[in-house]
Amino acid sequence: MAHAHGTPADFEELRERAVALRRAGRSLRQIRDELKVFDNDLLNRLVKGEPPPEWTRRPNAKDDLREKARELRLQGWTYDRIRAELGCSKSSISLWVRDLPKPERHDPAEQAKRAARKRWERELAVRDEQRRRTKAVAAQEIGRLSDREVFLAGVALYWAEGTKDKPHARRERVTFVNSDPDMIRLFSAWLRLLGVEPERIAYRVMIHESADVERAERYWADVAQADRSAFGRTTLKRHNPRTVRKNTGDGYHGCLVLTVRQSADLYRRIEGWWYGIVGAATAPDPQNRT
């Protein structure tokens, strides 16, 4: 019988036949059945070095899974994580990656912390996207503003952020201080709407002494669309060594002070406008809210 291979000559003869069948496109199962060799170890020795026929190779999809499994294993993933990720059996994964080094074992508590941190990072990303969408939709809801709407917004802005006259300290002068460039832009647009001439507006930067004063002045001149010649001497804030400052870095530009010269009458009108807004908004008859 073909499987009686007691001598080297018998083995070589059997190998020649097995190799011929392999090259003819036979699978291992077909060679086994034809030569009656049911010893798997012997069968593999007979065809050693001969590549399997193309038709017996794994489907491409399986090859892709195998490569992905090997890639994840090299990244230190466990069999269970790979199985959950790829949906493969643990036995298949073991077969695909058994020649790769085992990943370094980690402290379960540390692994749990890393997993929780990743979940939190994903949650933060979702919240950031929700926040961005909400703001974008809200901004679109405003649309174009009429001059009257800009006028009312400017009055409210000044009364919230501008300097106020007090009975014990008369300050009937329009002065606005802010570190938010958008607040400065809106206030400047409001002054233009009121017809305040640019030459009546004086500017001054207030900033920490360790900051780049020259850059801050250029920044605020651009924001306010003002000439640098309209800027007075910058006010420097001294550093307190016991204070930990957070307003540092390239994004720190200090505050801008805008003062309208000869503005006592304008200040009085602003105060009157504000009281008019409050009265209209709180009137019992909604029709007065115009």
Image (tube, grey):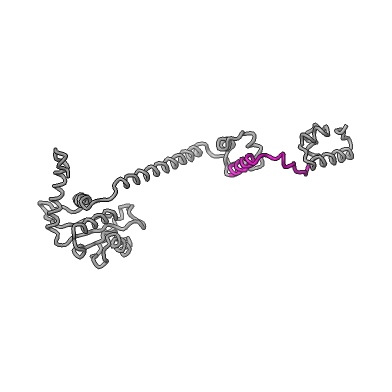
The percent coordinates of residue 257 (x first, y second) are 23, 58
What's the residue at 42%, 40% (across, down)? Answer: 123
What's the residue at 24%, 57% (across, down)? Answer: 189
What's the residue at 14%, 55% (across, down)? Answer: 267
Q: Is residue 62 magenta?
A: yes
What's the residue at 58%, 35% (across, down)? Answer: 87
The percent coordinates of residue 160 (x first, y second) are 21, 49
Q: Is residue 54 magenta?
A: yes
Q: Quadrant of the N terminus?
A: top right
Q: Nearer the viewer, residue 117 or 165?
A: 165
- Taking the view exactly as shown, the residue that stands out farthest to the bottom is 229
Image quadrant assignment for residue 127: top left
Q: Is residue 18 left or right of residue 269?
A: right
Which residues are the magenta region? 48-74
Q: Nearer the viewer, residue 221 or 113?
A: 221
Magenta stretch, main secondary structure, is helix
Q: Is residue 198 left or right of residue 133?
A: left
Q: Relative to residue 125, is residue 239 depicted above or below?
A: below
Q: Is residue 108 left or right of residue 44?
A: left
Image quadrant assignment for residue 130: top left
Q: Relative to residue 244, is residue 125 depicted above or below?
A: above
Image quadrant assignment for residue 14: top right
Q: Relative to residue 38, is residue 156 depicted above or below?
A: below
Q: Quadrant of the C terminus?
A: top left
